[in-house]
Amino acid sequence: MAQSTVESQVAQQLAKSTQQPVPTVSCPGSLKGVIGATLRCTLTPKGGTAKLPVLVTVTSVQNGTAHFFAQVGQVPGAGDKVAFCSDNAQLDQATSTAHQASDLIPIFKANRSLLSDFQSKAPSAIVNQAGVLVLAADHAISSGDASAFNTANVADAGKAIDAYCGQNANGSTTTSS
């Protein structure tokens, strides 16, 4: 699959799965049409400056066409649950003071490096949900529009991460009775 085709299709796939504007995806070359073949690309959200790693993996080949899955934030050895969940707790604490979606924008701006660390430390079990949140936050910073945080897709990603980390939406640890 030609480099430009991979870049275009990955960008479209990620925009659709995150319900965000189409990002810019840059890949170093073409993708081999062999199951399991991978390609490491870089994603820049529309209007943003953050550069996020994307791992593209061929999942099937049918009639000469390669089908793939793209994961944002997949860097070998990057998954660190303790650091990821610590970052999540800090972000949850910071965002728990927001009363409406627009209140999130200055919080995200103040926590850009924490958002980047959060994405880079995401374990593979939760990396897609982390990608949804980081892309939405980066879009909110660049566009001034945080309305994506009122959508089910973004809310579900946040809930999944909190459950994965055993945390409440305010960053506190959940307790069992």
Image (spheres, rainbow, N blue to C red):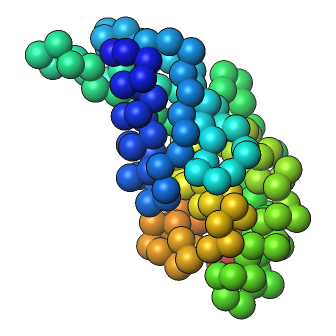
Classify residue 2 as left or right of residue 153: left
Identified at 17% across, 13% down, the residue is: 64
Identified at 85% across, 50% down, the residue is: 113
Tell me where residue 74 appears, x and y as whole percent: 61, 31
Q: In which quarter of the image is residue 90?
A: bottom right
Tell me where residue 71 appears, x and y as whole percent: 51, 36
Q: Pick the quarter of the image with the N terminus.
A: top left
Along the line of sight, the residue nearer the viewer: 2 or 129 = 2
Is 47 situated above or below 90? above
Is 124 situated above or below 2? below
Tell me where residue 142 appears, x and y as whole percent: 69, 61
Classify residue 102 as left or right of residue 116: left
Along the line of sight, the residue nearer the viewer: 149 or 160 = 149
Q: Is any atom of residue 108 visible in this view?
A: yes
Q: Pick the quarter of the image with the C terminus.
A: bottom right
Is 177 situated above or below 64? below
Identified at 38% across, 52% down, the residue is: 16
Q: How many labels does the image show?
A: 0
Q: Residue furthest left?
A: 63
Tell me where residue 23 appears, x and y as whole percent: 53, 45
Classify residue 106 as left or right of residue 11: right
Identified at 77% across, 53% down, the residue is: 115
Q: In which quarter of the image is residue 175?
A: bottom right
Q: Quadrant of residue 159?
A: bottom right
Q: Which residue lies furthest to the bottom in this view?
A: 99
Q: Is any atom of residue 174 visible in this view?
A: no
Is 30 situated above or below 115? above
Along the line of sight, the residue nearer the viewer: 162 or 51 = 51
